[in-house]
Image (spheres, rainbow, N blue to C red):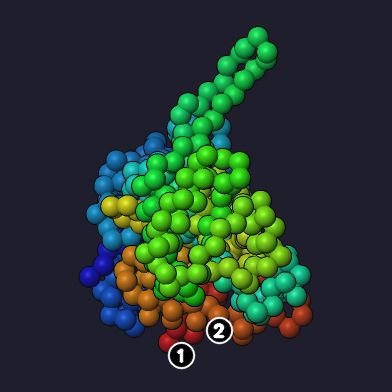
Amino acid sequence: MHQIAVLPGDGIGPEITREAVKVLKAAGEKHQLGLVFSHHLVGGALLDAQGVALSDELIENCRRNDAVLFGAVGGPKWDHLDMQNRADHALIRLRKELSVYANLRQFRLYAALEDASAVKTDLIAGGVDFIILRELSSGAYYGQPKFREDTPRGRRAVDTIEYFDFQVERLARYGFELARQRRGKLTSMSKWNALESSRLWRDVVEEVAREYPDVDTRHEIVDAGAMNLIRRPTEYDVIVMPNMFGDILGDEAAVLAGSIGMVPSAEISLDSTSLYEPIHGSANDIEGKNVANPLAMILSAALLLRYSLNCPAGADDIDRAVGKVIEGGYRTADIWKPADQQRVSTTEMGDLVVEMLSE
Ligand code: NAD
């Protein structure tokens, strides 16, 4: 038996999560996983009900489960609140409470979606399929000192980039293991020509690489890497990078996938429960219209089966079912082109994936 905490959240969160649970239930039955779901309010929905965006009880609940399926949080209704009470702060705190240290984003462009990608078709011919593994526990966003001050020369602001070798090592190791399960290629992107922290990053990745002689390891300076991701996206398999670079390049890479509604992610915990969520937010502009693309959420559910429940066959089934639906010409509004494609709602997209799962 596996227990999954479902936190739909706000905006389109409940709509897309409903479809992902439908798909997970079908895959769970097929692979006899004995999935048990519990649903919980979080973010704005919990603020409205209990006055807090995340409660200690909910954190404990998440820790007790085998995985967390998270929709999205936030919206204009709660934007006026101070940072600590904002709906979207719930996710930041939950990540910390669950000790997540790696953010895994999977970028895959289905062949039939090439026309939806913002990148020229000759650059993506041959298929885009790579993972960005971003370090999430340290780096520029957390390093101390971090402050602003008034000085005789004017206002001054300081941020600090800090990395310990063990933080780089555990991320690199996870990246190498992923590469082994995939196409055996790992690219490390950092800024070793200018930053001491990146020189340590590169050294540690090199050290770990010696344990993985079967993995083809490369280093790229992150600014060149940002360009190459668009110019030669088909060449990448697993890319590891420090927190801030992963934040920026993770969004850049989303243009390859055709829509932000197509990119799933996992947040891998060190010693607790991992969290699975689409990379997009609560898309309040399309909330309640049954037009949101649920595929990023459904593909996040596939990552959950692969990385938390150790059921790669179930994950492959979902990936294949999504591929068949796309090949079949079915599209939600964000990826729809009038040509000969059939426009479907959020619910219909979920139903189609379930139908393809049983084929
Ligand atoms: P967003 O990602 O919610 O939306 C950006 C644009 O992409 C919108 O036009 C939206 O309609 C579209 N979009 C997003 N997901 C889609 C989907 N599945 N199908 C079709 N179209 C989709 O970003 P935003 O508008 O800047 O933020 C809205 C709210 O979400 C804010 O309150 C923000 O703080 C919050 N947010 C939450 C998370 C999270 O929970 N992980 C992440 C980012 C933003």
Residue that label 2 marks: 324
Mark linked to residue 359: 1
Question: Which quarter of the figure has residue 66?
Answer: bottom left
Q: Amino acid at mark 1?
A: Glu
Q: Is residue 45 visible?
A: no
Mark linked to residue 237: none
Residue occupying the far top of the picture: 152
* Residue 331 locus on image (x, y percent): 64, 75
> In the rendered image of this protein, does residue 59 appear above or below residue 153?
below
Of residue 19 and residue 271, the one placed in the foreground of this image is 271
* Residue 271 locus on image (x, y percent): 28, 52
Image quarter hosting the N terminus: bottom left
* Mark 1–mark 2 CB contact (< 8 Å): yes
SS class, disc 2: helix
The residue under the point 26% across, 74% down is 34
> In the rendered image of this protein, does residue 240 appear above or below residue 50?
below
Q: Residues within 10 Å of mark 2 (few under 14, many from 20)?
A: some
The residue under the point 73% across, 83% down is 340
The residue under the point 57% across, 46% down is 192
* Residue 209 locus on image (x, y percent): 43, 62
Task: Tell me how far mark 1 sits from mark 2, CA to CA.
Answer: 10 Å
